[in-house]
Image: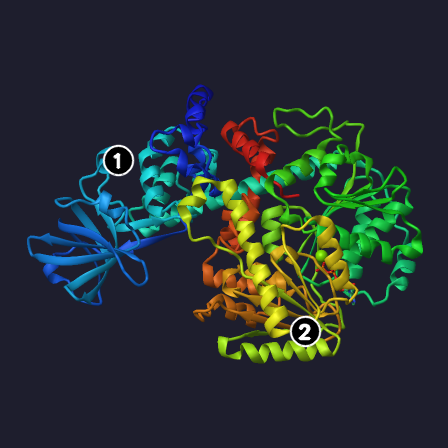
């Protein structure tokens, strides 16, 4: 199976652009891209989020109202019309089998009338209600029984019978369509080399690649789907482990400039702060100081919930690096955040005479004599060679896009000029020094997860909030209580406090247009977002708080404008800031005590938690008001946010609500998406670690496992985890 000749034959097919497949139209490409599907391989490795179990087929005569059923019959009649009042498109059909007849009705699925014709044989699955014309299937899933699909795949159960895969969807792409496409091409994997060595499969009782792929997309039983899933989880965790083992070995072989751990300096710094550091912060500074004192590059993740005080820890590290005669680069995901860090570093490092520069897309304020450069990803373009720096800090590292993360890693690797491109990374004698590397995140990763994902990465946890904090009071506000909430805000403002108002995220209803023109869509999305902010601003300034000082902030503004607005808010010249999600991360304005989120149910859990983290940063009692959209739907998610005290607790609840695999949104975690599911099983984590160590021990350059080496190289290409 691991025959290289075969691999070469196979690779071009699997790596074929998805656009080259006959069943894929141009129009659908942007939507596929959003799912991360660009090649046939991506498609076949786009796994179901879950499975739906359809009831077994039965005669129409034996169907009763209130049941979920599957029936098969001939379409007697099908037609559509538009409702006069709501403008909804309704499709009605009558279906008959030998035992009887039933109605079916669909809402806003006009295309069905093209698809299903009188005389078509269909299988329908859905809920039965009693309608005006008798028993009616409401919005059933459908499938033409004699379709090309059947002939192409030789499979009879597809969309409405037995276990059916439900995929993570996006605008314009349904699970139904994905199932169809995947079934058509799954044969292409028939002799794809299995990255997992035979011995590994045997040791852990895992199914081989091709049968696992079939089982995950078209399972016969839940058990076979689960076994397949476990195999892929194992594979992904194993790759991550091997990656970090090798990364670790590689870093061990590299050198960095030693930054002496100047304890008196740190003491002086700690004393100079306007607050007392938490024990967790002290511990983190201590760990970082010790790491940097070595002549090996530090690779440490500083993890702490929003508001736990990561910035000051980073500032301490920067101070040590500067005093040792080095330079520091610090990268933040947004311009607003870069400027804020610039201000924070400038003020807390003022007693130590460090020169601090700023580099964003809009601004370059630094020169050769700058000790610390703070910037956005613009840093990546300006600073081609990060080997110039003694210390590189990346804040909110999970927020950087895939390409930016890749660029960062590339830059970090620039020191390795004689890098061997074949993917064998162990280089012992490079004369180039690497910077020490500190990344920061508020992503609530439990330690076990971090270990499983990052392997031997060094981790400092800020598991303690500053003493002065009060728990943020979070309330879900029903429409009837809106006035009360406004009155409350007014009272807080009159006491000198400030408030944020976040406008709902925009979801455009016109899905087709979205797919047709992605760029245009982005623009109109932004325009729509700007409009909601303006509307909200207008409402607040004219109706609700005409006497208060209100400002607005959105993504269309120039950097300078945004900066001026944040500045005014910071200096308390504004009472209320109406904003889009641009202030989601990092923003730190301790005098703001109210976070009000409109359309709260449109945001993800992690995002809501981040918004809430914008308040409660000082010693005053803070509040977070969640306003659900008009229909008053209060989701379990909102309750979870209201009841969870911290990011960790929230991640746990999220797991319970959405099921594992989706805690942080797979996108953010890239390849770690599946591994996250596995991490809750400590035995699996142990097994995987052991297996990784075993394989690397047997064949350090993996030459004994070419398929695994290839898979690992491919993963490392896209991996950002550092
Ligand atoms: P995050 O971990 O979310 O990045 P920040 O570093 O922005 O948090 O810190 C949040 C706020 O807490 C800032 O205003 C900071 O000055 C303040 N702060 C940090 N550490 C302490 C502490 N030990 N005691 C009191 N306030 C602190
Ligand atoms: Mg921060």
Residue 620 can be seen in this image: yes
Is residue 719 found left or right of 383 in the rendered image?
left
> Of circles 2 and 1, which is in front?
2
Q: Which of 323 and 294 lies nearest the eye of the viewer?
A: 323
In the image, farthest residue toward the top: 5
| Quarter holding residue 545 | bottom right
Q: Does any atom of ligand 2 lie closer than 8 Å to the CB of label 1? A: no
Q: Position of residue 521 (x, y in %)?
A: 50, 45
Is residue 617 found left or right of 693 in the rendered image?
right
Give the spatial CA distance, label 2 vs label 1.
59 Å
Labelled disc at residue 622: 2
First-in-chain label (2 vs 1): 1
Ligand 2 - quadrant of the structure image: bottom right
- The residue indicated by pointer 1 is 153
Q: Position of residue 351 (x, y in %)?
A: 93, 57
Q: Which of 19 and 226 lies nearest the eye of the viewer?
A: 19
Q: Which of 494 and 613 lies nearest the eye of the viewer?
A: 494
């Amino acid at each position: 199976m691991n025959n290289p000749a075969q691999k070469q034959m196979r690779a071009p097919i699997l790596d074929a652009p998805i656009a080259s497949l006959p069943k894929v139209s141009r129009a659908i490409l942007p939507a596929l891209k959003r799912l991360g599907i660009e090649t046939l391989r991506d498609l076949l490795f786009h796994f179901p989020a879950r499975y739906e179990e359809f009831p077994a087929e039965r005669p129409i005569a034996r169907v009763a109202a209130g049941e979920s059923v599957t029936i098969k019959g001939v379409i007697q009649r099908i037609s559509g019309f538009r409702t006069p009042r709501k403008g909804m498109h309704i499709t009605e059909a009558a279906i008959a089998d030998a035992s009887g007849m039933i109605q079916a009705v669909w809402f806003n699925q006009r295309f069905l009338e093209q698809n299903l014709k009188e005389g078509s044989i269909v299988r329908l699955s859905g809920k039965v209600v009693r309608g005006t014309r008798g028993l009616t299937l409401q919005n059933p899933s459908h499938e033409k029984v004699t379709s090309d699909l059947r002939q192409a795949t030789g499979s009879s159960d597809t969309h409405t019978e037995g276990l059916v895969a439900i995929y993570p969807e996006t605008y314009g792409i349904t699970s139904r369509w994905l199932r169809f496409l995947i079934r058509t091409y799954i044969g292409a994997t028939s002799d794809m080399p299995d990255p997992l060595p035979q011995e590994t499969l045997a040791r852990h009782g895992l199914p081989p690649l091709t049968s696992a792929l079939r089982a995950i997309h078209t399972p016969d039983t839940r058990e076979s789907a689960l076994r397949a899933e476990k195999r892929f989880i194992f594979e992904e965790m194993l790759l991550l482990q091997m990656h970090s083992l090798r990364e670790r070995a590689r870093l061990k072989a590299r050198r960095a400039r030693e930054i002496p751990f100047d304890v008196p300096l740190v003491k002086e710094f700690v004393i100079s702060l306007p607050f007392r550091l938490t024990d967790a912060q002290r511990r983190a500074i201590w760990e970082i100081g010790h790491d940097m004192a070595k002549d090996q590059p530090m690779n440490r993740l500083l993890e702490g919930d929003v508001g736990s005080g990561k910035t000051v820890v980073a500032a301490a590290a920067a101070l040590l690096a500067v005093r040792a005669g080095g330079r520091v680069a610090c990268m933040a995901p947004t311009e607003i955040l870069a400027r804020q860090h610039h201000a924070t570093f400038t003020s807390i490092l003022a007693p130590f005479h460090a020169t601090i520069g700023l580099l964003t897309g809009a601004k370059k304020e630094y020169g050769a004599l700058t000790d610390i450069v703070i910037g956005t990803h613009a840093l990546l373009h300006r600073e081609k060679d990060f080997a110039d720096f003694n210390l590189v800090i990346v804040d909110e590292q999970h927020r950087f896009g895939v390409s930016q993360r890749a660029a960062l890693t590339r830059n970090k690797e620039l020191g390795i000029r004689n890098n061997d491109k074949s993917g064998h990374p162990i280089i012992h004698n490079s004369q180039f020094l690497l910077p020490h590397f500190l990344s920061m995140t508020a992503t609530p990763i439990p330690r076990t997860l971090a270990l499983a994902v990052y392997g031997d990465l060094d981790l400092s946890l800020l598991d303690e909030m500053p003493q002065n904090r009060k728990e943020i009071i979070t309330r879900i506000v029903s429409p009837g209580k809106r006035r009360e909430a406004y009155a409350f805000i007014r009272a807080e403002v009159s006491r000198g406090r400030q408030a944020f108002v976040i406008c709902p995220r925009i979801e455009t209803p016109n899905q087709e247009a979205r797919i047709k023109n992605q760029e245009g869509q982005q623009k109109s999305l932004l325009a729509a977002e700007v409009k909601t902010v303006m509307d909200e601003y207008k409402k607040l300034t004219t109706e609700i708080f005409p006497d208060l000082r209100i400002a607005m902030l959105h993504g269309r503004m120039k950097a300078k404008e945004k900066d001026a607005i944040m500045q005014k808010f910071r200096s308390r010249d504004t009472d209320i800031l109406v904003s889009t999600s641009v202030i989601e991360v990092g923003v730190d304005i301790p005098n703001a005590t109210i976070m009000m989120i409109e359309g709260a149910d449109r945001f993800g859990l992690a995002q809501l938690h981040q918004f809430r983290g914008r308040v409660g940063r000082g010693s005053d009692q803070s509040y977070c008001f969640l306003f659900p959209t008009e229909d008053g739907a209060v989701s379990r998610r909102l309750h979870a946010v209201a009841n969870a005290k911290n990011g960790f607790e929230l991640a746990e609840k999220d797991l319970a609500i959405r099921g594992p695999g989706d805690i942080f949104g797979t996108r953010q975690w890239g390849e770690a998406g599946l591994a996250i599911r596995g991490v809750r099983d400590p035995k699996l984590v142990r097994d995987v670690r052991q297996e990784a160590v075993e394989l690397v021990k047997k064949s350090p350059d993996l030459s004994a496992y070419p398929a695994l080496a290839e898979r690992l190289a491919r993963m490392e290409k896209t991996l950002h985890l550092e």
